[in-house]
Image (cartoon, rainbow, N blue to C red):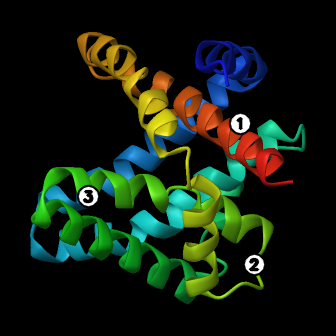
């Protein structure tokens, strides 16, 4: 898989949607980031919002990838399977934190292995949380290093976004997400 080509294709696919994607990324960032800065209850509120908003962002990104209508309402769609997405977010978070406590490398491996969970939930809402996590792990089996390199390729772009008064991060985020969604599609094709 040519990762640079994947990034280029994702950027081209995102071009007609970039302005709305920028605003959706800002909404996502504000709703997840600001409450945790307020107080203890804000951290809890941020935790409750993070999973559904990540699912909503993933729905929006997959709609762009599949050339389906994509709009800001997709962000709210992440709240429809509320209990399931909250439990999924909790399990992924706890597993990743435990991995990072053990050492940094297991945390990265766990994070990469479970990173396709939201896309799997979107396309297979009938699956249980356990099945979603297992499917994500199976999908990324043998591809975690390449997926890790893909994420690393966006670090310079995020740093550039920080230099652009932090606003640039919200330009890079949808591009990064769409590239990961494209990689998800590639992984599905590799499984047959």
User: Residue beneath label 3, please?
Assistant: 107
Q: Position of residue 128 (x, y in %)?
A: 65, 88
User: Residue beneath label 1, please?
Assistant: 182
- Please report the residue visible at 67 percent of the width from the left and 17 percent of the height from the top: 11
Mark 3 or 2 closer to N-term?
3
Q: Left of 18 or right of it: where is 96? A: left
Looking at the image, residue 67 lies above or below residue 127: above
Nearer to us: label 3 or label 1: 3
Q: From the image, which quarter does the N terminus lie in?
A: top right
Q: Depth check: 63 or 125 in front? A: 125
Q: Left of 163 or right of it: where is 52? A: right
Q: Residues within 10 Å of mark 1 (few under 14, many from 20)?
A: many
Q: Are marks 3 and 1 in contact (CB under 8 Å)?
A: no
User: Residue beneath label 2, please?
Assistant: 125
- Please report the residue visible at 60 percent of the width from the left and 20 percent of the height from the top: 3
Nearer to us: label 2 or label 1: 1
Q: CA distance from mark 3 to mark 1?
A: 23 Å
Looking at the image, residue 51 lies above or below residue 87: above
Looking at the image, residue 146 lies above or below residue 27: above
């Amino acid at each position: 898989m040519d990762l640079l080509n994947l990034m280029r294709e994702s950027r081209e696919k995102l071009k007609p949607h970039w302005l709305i994607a920028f605003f959706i990324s800002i909404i996502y960032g504000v709703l997840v980031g600001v409450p945790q800065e307020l107080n203890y209850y804000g951290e809890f509120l941020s935790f409750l919002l993070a999973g559904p908003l990540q699912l909503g962002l993933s729905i929006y990104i997959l709609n762009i990838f599949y050339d389906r209508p994509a709009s800001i309402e997709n962000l709210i769609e992440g709240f429809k399977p509320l209990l399931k997405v909250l439990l999924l977010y909790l399990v992924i978070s706890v597993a990743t934190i435990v991995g990072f406590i053990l050492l940094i490398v297991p945390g990265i491996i766990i994070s990469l292995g479970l990173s396709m969970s939201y896309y799997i939930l979107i396309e297979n809402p009938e699956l249980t949380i356990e099945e979603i996590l297992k499917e994500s792990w199976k999908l990324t089996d043998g591809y975690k290093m390449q997926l890790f390199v893909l994420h690393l390729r966006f670090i310079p772009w995020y740093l550039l976004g920080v230099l652009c008064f932090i606003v640039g991060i919200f330009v890079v985020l949808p591009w990064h997400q769409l590239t990961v969604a494209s990689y998800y599609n590639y992984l599905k094709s590799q499984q047959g």
